[in-house]
């Protein structure tokens, strides 16, 4: 099973930027579909973005399209999420996830990293 560890969260003003990283260990990272989700208290976890193993395809939630960019470096077993033009409503705990069996179900999750956007 793959282990995931997020980093890069923090406090930023509205309009600012952050770059989240998720380092993976174990397994064959380049085969996995990787994704980012986010969650705020009292709400369900929300899909943010995903990227295929080869980086050939990616997808985004409408709420972040044009502002966030997902990418990966398979040589470093790391997936990134660049967050630009941040808004207060982007405040959440951001989680990295892996679909290691390519079943469209994410079976490995990181512990999350907090992103707080002040308005």
Image (cartoon, rainbow, N blue to C red):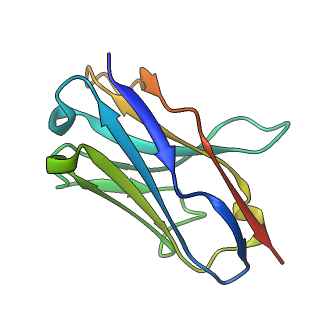
Q: Position of residue 6 (x, y in %)?
A: 49, 44
- Between 7 and 119, the residue placed more toward the observer is 7
Residue 39, by quadrant, is: top right
Q: Name the residue rendered at 41%, 23% in the picture.
A: 105
Q: Residue furthest bottom?
A: 15
| Residue located 29% across and 30% down the image | 25
Q: How many marks?
A: 0
Asked if residue 31 is positioned above or below residue 19 in the image, the reply reads above
Q: Is residue 44 left or right of residue 32?
A: right
Give the quarter of the image for residue 86.
bottom right
Q: Position of residue 22 (x, y in %)?
A: 41, 46
- Where is residue 27 shown, x and y percent of the image? 21, 23
22 over 58 or under it: above or below:
above
Q: Residue at x 60, y 80 (%)?
A: 85
Location of the C terminus by quadrant is: bottom right
Q: Residue at x 43, y 53 (%)?
A: 21
Q: Is residue 77 above or below residue 100?
A: below
Where is the N terminus found, in terms of image quarters?
top left
Q: Nearer the viewer, residue 35 or 26?
A: 26
Is residue 102 found left or right of 85 in the rendered image? left
Instruction: Name the foreground residue: 16 vs 107.
Output: 16
Q: Is residue 110 left or right of residue 70?
A: right
């Amino acid at each position: 099973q793959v282990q995931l560890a997020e980093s890069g969260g923090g406090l930023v003003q509205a309009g600012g930027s952050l770059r989240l990283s998720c380092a993976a260990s174990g397994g064959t990272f380049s085969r996995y579909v990787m994704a980012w989700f986010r969650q705020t208290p009292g709400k369900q976890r929300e899909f943010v973005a995903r990227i295929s193993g080869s980086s050939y395809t990616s997808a985004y939630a409408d709420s972040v399209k044009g502002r966030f960019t997902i990418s990966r470096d398979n040589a470093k077993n790391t997936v990134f999420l660049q967050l630009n033009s941040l808004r207060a409503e982007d405040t959440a705990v951001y989680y990295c996830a892996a679909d290691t069996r390519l079943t469209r179900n994410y079976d490995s999750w990181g512990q999350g990293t907090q992103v707080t956007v002040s308005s």
